[in-house]
Amino acid sequence: MQLARLPRVRLAPLPTPLEEAPRLRHALGGGRGGPRVLVKRDDLTGLGMGGNKVRKLEFHLGDALAQGCDVLVTTGAIQSNHCRVTAAAACRAGLEAVLILRPGEPQDVQGNLLLDRVFGARIRIAPGPTSASVEAAVAEEMDALRREGRRPYLVPKGASTALGAAAYVEAYMEMLGQTTTMGAVVDAIVFCTGSGGTHAGLLAGAVLCQSGVEVVGISDGASRAELAPIVTSLINDVAETLDVAIRVAPEAVIVLEDYGGTYGVPTPECLDAIRLAARTEGLLLDPVYTGKAMAGLADLVRRGRWREDQTVVFWHTGGQPALFAHARALEGPE
Ligand SMILES: *Cc1c(COP(=O)(O)O)cnc(C)c1O
């Protein structure tokens, strides 16, 4: 595997912790006893309040610097964690960041949008929410920067590229090493999937290690029909980048659609899951991704998907700054 040869800038203190969550396990299992629950703390990747984008950006920033680029350009929702971490990564390397944000969510200067400003990113709101409109604004910005003599580096949405997926192949192996040390055998990983890079990396890692671990993506609102082919195509790309022979059929990609609702809008079950994790373990989830993933885990445990002697890793991908942008939804005492 050619991972060590990829240009990289270290941004995250690795490995991130893998923590036991006994009180959460008990609460999820109710009277029936659910599987052992371990939490992989990729919310603790450090840079700019962390999350899964930090691992992915280590390789993108390495690539940008190797190419002599001087400004990072990327895109995402108004409350994008990816844009916030890209802005922080640019600061770390002495580059500028330009963020093209997709309109649609409230534009209060709160949460990630506030942090984008603190990091000094140049923020531009795309004229419309469609991908065509956002892509046109990105292309315009790239051209304008080149005309000014700048060397822009485009980080695709969510940093979900072969490089981003490669970071999660490595993360998978990191987790496997930790569970081996603990004497635990993992049966499943549950996490929130959105632009597909995390999913592709974790699934590629599981296939590479022939570990038989079930890789369960809970959708952030995207449909399975849309996501599964993105994940398989990213797996092909990362296999090529790492020079390994793996292939995954779209049917083998697990994307559960029942917990995402509308992207960026927390469901009642998501809000309950945020309170549950907070009140059992002091663990903060987020209202757009990890709260939905936990709502999914809760439902799957309730339905008896795993036995008491099995182990599930809940992969915490971060996102907590968005809590503050959703204060209204969370202020109630429930
Ligand atoms: C981006 C993001 C995800 C989804 O990861 P993808 O690799 O884009 O699928 C999940 N959780 C959080 C907190 C994120 O910011």
Image (cartoon, rainbow, N blue to C red):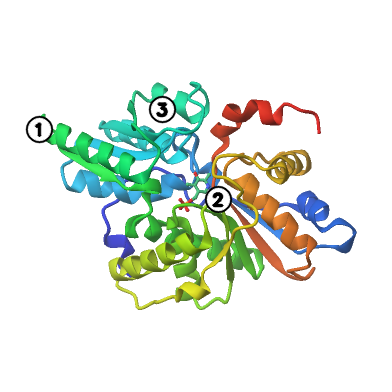
Asked if residue 10 shows in the view, the reply is no
Dot 2 lies on which element? loop
Which residue bears the numbered disc 1? Answer: 147
**Mark before the other along the chain sequence, 2 or 3:** 3
Callout 1 crowding tier (Cα within 10 Å): few <14, some 14–19, many ≥20: few
Q: Is mark 3 within 8 Å of ligand 1?
A: no
Q: Which mark is residue 116?
A: 3
Q: Residue at x 38, y 34 (%)?
A: 101
Q: Nearer the viewer, mark 2 or mark 1?
A: 2
Q: Residue at x 34, y 27 (%)?
A: 123
Q: Is mark 1 within 8 Å of ligand 1?
A: no
| Horizontal relation, residue 230 to residue 276: left or right | left
Q: Residue at x 48, y 21 (%)?
A: 109
Q: Amino acid at mark 1?
A: Arg
Expressed as whole percent of the image width and height from the top left, the position of residue 271 reads 70, 40
Q: Nearer the viewer, mark 1 or mark 3?
A: 1
Label 2, label 1: how far apart the Cα atoms are: 38 Å
Q: Quadrant of residue 4?
A: bottom left
Q: Amino acid at mark 3?
A: Asp
Q: Which of the two residues, 325 or 239, is positioned nearer the viewer here?
A: 325
